[in-house]
Amino acid sequence: MENRLRLLYSLQLVDSNLDELQELKGDLPKIVAELSETIKGKLAQKKELDDILKKSIVNRDKTDVDILSLKEKIEKYKTQQFQVKTNKQYDMLAREVDHAQEKITKLQREMDELEGKAEFAKEDAEKLRPEIETLQAEFTDRKKELTAVNKEHEDEELKFQHQREKIISRVSKADYQMYDRIRKAKEGRAIVQVQRNSCGGCFNRVTPQRVLELRKNSTLITCERCGRVLVSDAIVESAKKSV
């Protein structure tokens, strides 16, 4: 049990050091991540608009070709009307002309809609362009700042990460899950020292009886108020020597 407690407190010490290094970076990691996601979203939005523009232009041009083809048919039908010998044939060609003209009217409406759609897509895409450029410039600047901060503390961070990996390899799965759960719930502090008969996390008083039990290092004791794992001075000193 003593070794188990020492490993858990050693892990807490290393994680606290890593937390301090993260705090030195401030909000930069979060800002860089958020900018990256925003840029991805804007680029996807612009691509969608560009695709709409291209598709609308292709469909508009196809519609225009169909209209020209129908107009040629109308001229052909009108020419044939002068050549027919019966009213029935003339009326049949007249119906064909009317039908073709109806199609042209419908296609012209569709072409107008496609042109409007293309124009709106083009305008919206143009509005996005400077917005994306501004975001990309800010992302580049912030990324440089974060890289500089990371570089400054790179060796120290790597050292603590290496220590963390070594400790985790020796901590049982159940203990690590417990530690991780408490750490997430208690602002990064899962294992705390009892100081002046009080919990080092929430400062709730620890009874003399529990302090005596704690000093034996023979059982896992948690704070009755905050649920953090409590450790004795002996565990703390021993863990500090190993980290």
Image (cartoon, rainbow, N blue to C red):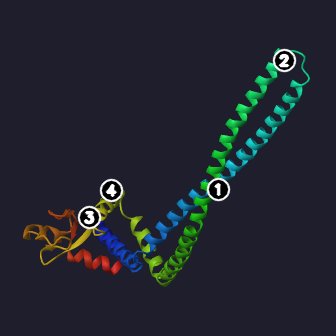
| Location of mark 2 (residue) | 89
Looking at the image, tell me whether mark 4 or mark 1 is earlier in sequence order.
Answer: 1
Looking at the image, tell me whether mark 4 or mark 3 is earlier in sequence order.
Answer: 3
The kind of secondary structure element at disc 1 is helix
Q: Quadrant of residue 49?
A: bottom right
Q: CA distance from mark 4 to mark 3?
A: 14 Å
Looking at the image, tell me whether mark 2 or mark 1 is earlier in sequence order.
Answer: 1
Of badges 2 and 4, the one in the foreground is 2
Q: Is residue 208 above or below residue 179?
A: below
Mark 4: few/some/many CA within 10 Å (<14, 14-19, 20+): few
Looking at the image, tell me whether mark 2 or mark 3 is earlier in sequence order.
Answer: 3
**Quick check: can you spot residue 28?**
yes
**Which residue type does callout 2 highlight?**
Gln
The kind of secondary structure element at disc 2 is helix
Work out which residue is located at the far bottom of the displayed protein and give it. Answer: 152
| Location of mark 3 (residue) | 1
- Horizontal side of 217 relative to 177 (left or right) equals left
Labelled disc at residue 194: none
**Pointers 1 and 3 in contact (C-beta within 8 Å):** no
**Pointers 2 and 1 in contact (C-beta within 8 Å):** no
**Pointers 4 and 1 in contact (C-beta within 8 Å):** no
The kind of secondary structure element at disc 3 is loop
Labelled disc at residue 50: 1
Residue 232: x %, y % from top left: 20, 73
Of badges 1 and 3, the one in the foreground is 1
| Location of mark 4 (residue) | 174
Residue 184: x %, y % from top left: 31, 63
Q: CA distance from mark 2 to mark 3?
A: 106 Å
Quadrant where the image shows the N terminus: bottom left
Q: Is residue 83 above or below residue 9?
A: above
Q: CA distance from mark 2 to mark 4?
A: 92 Å
